[in-house]
Amino acid sequence: MTLPRFYPVFDSADWVVRAVPLGVRLVQLRIKERQDDDLRAEIQTALACCRQHGAALVINDHWQLAIELGADWLHLGQEDLDTADIAAIRRAGLKLGVSTHDHTELDRALALAPEYIALGPVYPTILKKMKWTEQGLDRLTEWKGLVGDIPLCAIGGMSVERAAGAYAAGADMVAAVTDITLNADPDTRICAWLKAAA
Ligand SMILES: Cc1ncc(COP(=O)(O)OP(=O)(O)O)c(N)n1
Ligand SMILES: Cc1ncsc1CCOP(=O)(O)O
Ligand SMILES: [Mg+2]
């Protein structure tokens, strides 16, 4: 499967249900600090919507629920990898994306043969406090040289205006959160992303 070039990340199934009918074909559900029952309901709603529209849903962090609910994709960061059961995840047939920020993390990610590797924050992000400063476009180019055929995802401070630069630098996919969710007109912004990624 060739992964879509635009990869929005949302914190609720409502956002997924809003974005997918507009043409989004790869989307992440990234929900923090919620009870399992709530998470289960969110994942099930998002999964049903994505399956109806032929889109791929990536579950962030919650690998046990992803297995339990028969999800297809999972995203794990380096701290998630410390506790995740990769063998169980693979046995369940889940495809995997992994976050990286430096060479040690990249080596660890490559050893897992993930379906994509993410590098970030490419630009400063306001979504979460991170110990990593901006990586920049040259770092994306370096990463693309190191990951070879594995799709590379740029994340962190990405915007429609910055997308072309990230693709030109070597990103196969660009992920974004607040460029959409804080926009005054998220639907129009999603459509602009789809155009920029086409
Ligand atoms: C596409 C993509 N890239 C990176 C991340 C970050 O994952 P992680 O480092 O585990 O941090 P949290 O998102 O869990 O706070 C991501 N979610 N998606
Ligand atoms: C989850 C995550 N991982 C690296 S940067 C980032 C935040 C991306 O959010 P935004 O697109 O709003 O900068
Ligand atoms: Mg995580």
Image (cartoon, helix red, strand yellow):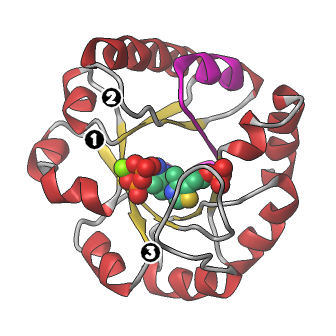
> Would you identify the image quadrant in which residue 40 lies?
top left
The residue that disc 3 covers is: 101
The residue that disc 1 covers is: 94
The answer, for residue 2, to whether it is visible in the render is: no
Secondary structure found at label 1: loop
Q: Position of residue 144 (x, y in %)?
A: 55, 80
Q: Residues within 10 Å of mark 3 (few under 14, many from 20)?
A: many
Do the numbered discs 1 and 2 sit on residues whose CB atoms are within 8 Å? Answer: yes
Confirm if mark 1 falls within 8 A of ligand 3: no
Ligand 2 - quadrant of the structure image? bottom right
Q: Position of residue 54 (x, y in %)?
A: 56, 25
The answer, for residue 167, to whether it is visible in the render is: yes
Q: Who comes first in sequence, dot 1 or dot 2?
A: 2
Q: Is residue 195 magenta?
A: no
Q: Is residue 3 magenta?
A: yes
The residue that disc 2 covers is: 71
